[in-house]
Image (cartoon, helix red, strand yellow):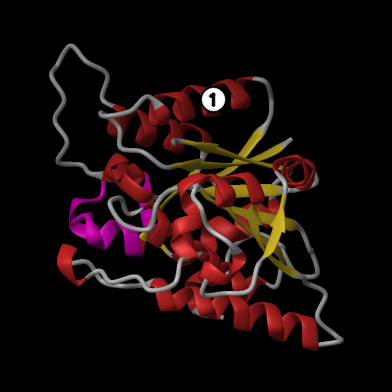
Amino acid sequence: MKFGILVNEGPFTHQASDSAYQFTKAAIAKGHQVMRVFFYYDGVNNANRLSEPQADDRNLVKLWGELAKEHKIDLVVCIAAALRRGIKEEILAEGFRISGLGQLIEVGIAADRTVMFGD
Amino acid sequence: MSEDMEGSFETEGVHKQFMFLNRKAPYGTIYALEVLEMILISAAFEQNTNVVFMDDGVYQIRKGMDTKPVNMKNFSPTYRILEAEKEDADEDPDAEMKWRLIVEKESMEARGLTPEDFIIEVEVLPAKQVGELMAEMDVILGG
């Protein structure tokens, strides 16, 4: 099955991004395809390479990037939501790219299932 | 369509059922505004579009918003674009998409509102029917 994933919350305030990450990993392990992960609302903070969680905590920004690299997953950050929150090209973590909301609608059309994480 | 919408996936000729679920009050959080931005972008993709207002989301289309005292941009008039999109889709015999603008009846009534209180014309559906419609959707997005 082809999945589109939508992450609507930041990486540290809310469980949503962790759940999305675990879901993405599990889906791939089961042989499914994750076509794109789209970050919206405060979810754009997942792409901030300046994030420095304490050393004994998981670093979700890095984990997303590593997962994307390993499985060639397209990680897209919404430009309008990102600019509002100061997430710009120059602080984008590895594996992420900034693009428009059209990328979310497009994956919604193309994927078999679109799964949203967040409130 | 702008450049960033020309994506990598084949979507030509595919018509899905999209639902945009508005559940939050218009001001106080950014969810209402950012759902509205999603809906406006989605219009370019010519999909079947079901916009639902429920819970405090019914306040999003209430007439007479004055946001000056809270120093927020009043984006309420932008909801009228949804009505215009619906009219365009209804009037175009070649359009393969359909727009529905829906308010959940129980949420509306619990807040003492009637359809006359809204800045756009809506269908009022009981929760059960909204639930049935939801089950028919391909993609549900919201905030």
The boundaries of the magenta stretch are A80-98
Disc 1 is placed on an element classified as: helix
Quarter of the view holding residue B76: bottom left
Q: Is residue A84 in view?
A: yes
Residue position marked by numbered label 1 in the rendering: A23
Q: Residues within 10 Å of mark 1 (few under 14, many from 20)?
A: some
Residue A99, relative to residue B23: is it above or below? below
Residue at point 46%, 24% (across, down): A19
**Where in the figure is residue B54, as x and y percent of width and height?**
56, 49
Task: Name the side, left or right, on which A25 lies relative to A44.
Answer: right
Residue A83 spot, x, y in % from top left: 25, 62
Q: Position of residue B41 (x, y in %)?
A: 52, 70
User: Residue A86 colored magenta?
Assistant: yes
Q: Is residue B97 left or right of residue B64?
A: right
Q: Decide if residue A94 is in sight here.
A: no
For the point 42% across and 78% down, which residue is it?
B77
Point 70% across, 83% down: residue: B87
Q: Amino acid at mark 1?
A: Phe
Q: Residue at x 54, y 25 (%)?
A: A23
Compared across the picture, whether A22 is left or right of B86 comes to left
Give yes or no for residue B20 being in the magenta stretch: no
Q: Position of residue B72 (x, y in %)?
A: 22, 66
Q: Chain of mark 1?
A: A
